[in-house]
Image (cartoon, coloured by chain):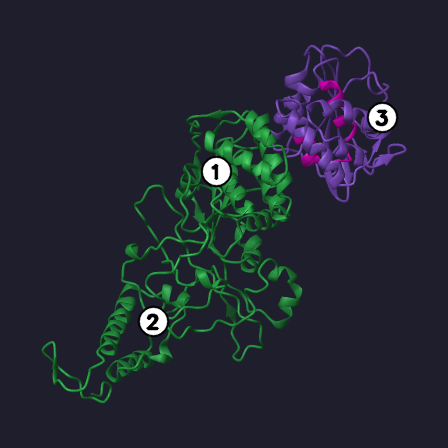
Chain colours: A purple, B green
Amino acid sequence: MSDTIHELLLRLAGRLPDDVLWRFRDWAASDAVVVLARALPRTLLHDRIGLTDYEQQLLGDALIPHGADRGLISSVRGLDELPEPDYTFTPESPNRVSMGDSATVVLGATLRGRPGVGEVRSAWRQRGGESRRVILVTASSGHTRLTGELQRVLRALGDHDPCVEVLPGDEDLPPYHRAALAASELVCTGAEADGHLVPV
Amino acid sequence: MTNDGVGLPVRLHDVLLALAGRVDDDALTQARELLAVAEPDRAVELLVGCLLAGRVPVSVDERRELGRLLDEVRSDPSLADRLFAVEHVPTVRHRFTAESDPSDGLAEALARTVTALPDVRGVRATWRSTPAGAAHGPLPQRVVLVDIGPSGFGPATAYRVETVLRKAGIRAAVEVLTVGTPLGEYHAAAVTTAREVFFPATPAPTPVRVAEEPGGTWFDGEVQDGAPVVEPEPVPAEPDLGSKSRRARVESYEGAQPFPPKPVKRLPVRDAVDEPVELPAVVELPVEPPVVSSVEPIEPIPPVEPPTEPTPLDLHPLSRAEVTTELGPDDLAALQAALADGHPPAGVTLPPTVDAKLSDRERALLQQLHEELAQREQQSWPAGPEYVNGVHKPTNGQFPG
């Protein structure tokens, strides 16, 4: 069930506002799923965000058991296919200053060699003059909890709306994550780094 | 916490204030934004979600109030039952400091916004060096405290001030406090160290300025339409609070004033029921819990007209720029002549903002003059007796009889 919510929220990256998405993922990692069951459908309706048939199925499976309104879920607009991301990804921030990068240093210290964690990569997303870091992590289990943990670390380091994408690694990734991975650079590897997310 | 006939936005704003320092600042900011843009349902659910996710302790009263709010926005009131309610909410001690000037850059960023917003009384800032909430942000956190009067709108003020600051590249937790309402521990501690934001003098506005600033009438369209009009009658000593809402009431601070209330004429306030209350320029009350001390109120903005006289500078409503309020020889002579005539010195009536800047000595002199005038006016001598209370009846023509 938790994996279902995680997969749904993962697929909404770049489609929900960052400040909303990180909060929903934080709720999914804690005891606030019942509120998420009300807030997520309402946000999708409010922002006119559409879902594919598969995502509609995820939405219902994940949230109806927690009290989501079937009527609201049925009102979510349908999508034939996922749109291409409206972002540009680069390995480095165009605004980067030569003061070091505390976030990657802390992530490296936290995740290097950790069981269940594969590659940890970083990319920068740009749109409309705004640049934002995206952290991509592969993990074999505990995706929701790891997402919540890394989000809190990045927030404490000054990223108010962290973009943390914890990927199962064995499924067909949405266009957003494929584009981010293609432009990403390696930060560190955990104990599960059998394969590579990006061909080397 | 009871409904008490107070509107949902105001009650939710109060709940958000009570949770400051316990929920992360971004959550409070987002909830206030949702409240300000008329989406209270999402605001309440966001707040409840953050409380659940962070397992933030709430009091039984707070849980009950949140349940009512959920019900009123047609959400599920049973969500409140999942909150972590405790008998005594553990006190989260926060450290605030005003070192390294927390007000830096705020005056430039906020000058226009605080002018446009209704009834903003003052802005202060401090640094908080302790985390707040389960998913807290970087430290130190700048906290901006905005004081509003009873005619102000808490959620709107918080939303617009925070938005303007963010556009200026300043991240801050914006807390809007209503003058005269008790402060919680968090805000009391913040106020103790907060440094006031001084708004500099700005170039005089031109008629074009209003056209360039459509936000100037946002939320307060009826407020700034008329020019300040001097009221013909003195303000009654006891304001009639009969049918006013709980939020609209403001404590009387007259007992804390260094001088008795002056029968000065007041500028009109936006809401007639708020008219009788005037707060002193600086209030220090040894009361518990502490209340927001009023800083200098903003004058209603007069309609823009071509200036009759060239003025090089127009002081910002919250400006602390030095204003010369010494009475000139002519004014003093007019006061003395008026005293001799028994007529109020109409030519030297001072607006409240100038009046608030009088020195103690000047205020004492004015007070003495007012008292003597009032004493004479009250002596409406009936015809007949030559003595009243052992005093000769005046025969200077001012009190015929």
Measured Cα–Cα span from mark 3 to mark 1: 42 Å
Name the residue tied to disc 1: B18
Instruction: Specify the amino acid type for callout 1.
Output: Ala
Task: State which region is magenta.
Answer: A1-24
Q: How many marks?
A: 3
Residue B186, percent across and down?
A: 44, 37
Measured Cα–Cα span from mark 1 to mark 2: 44 Å
* Relative height, residue B55 to residue B305 (above, below): above
Q: Residue at x 82, y 13 (%)?
A: A195
Q: Given the image, what chain letter belongs to the residue carrying mark 3?
A: A
Residue A14, percent across and down?
A: 77, 34
Name the residue tied to disc 2: B326
Residue B183, percent across and down?
A: 41, 42
How dense is the environment of label 3, judged by Cα within 10 Å: few (below 14), some, or many (20 and up)? few
Left or right? Give the position of B270 relative to A90.
Answer: left
Mark 2 and mark 3 in contact (Cβ < 8 Å)? no
Instruction: Specify the amino acid type for callout 3.
Output: Tyr
Instruction: Specify the amino acid type for callout 2.
Output: Glu
Residue B70, percent across and down?
A: 59, 36
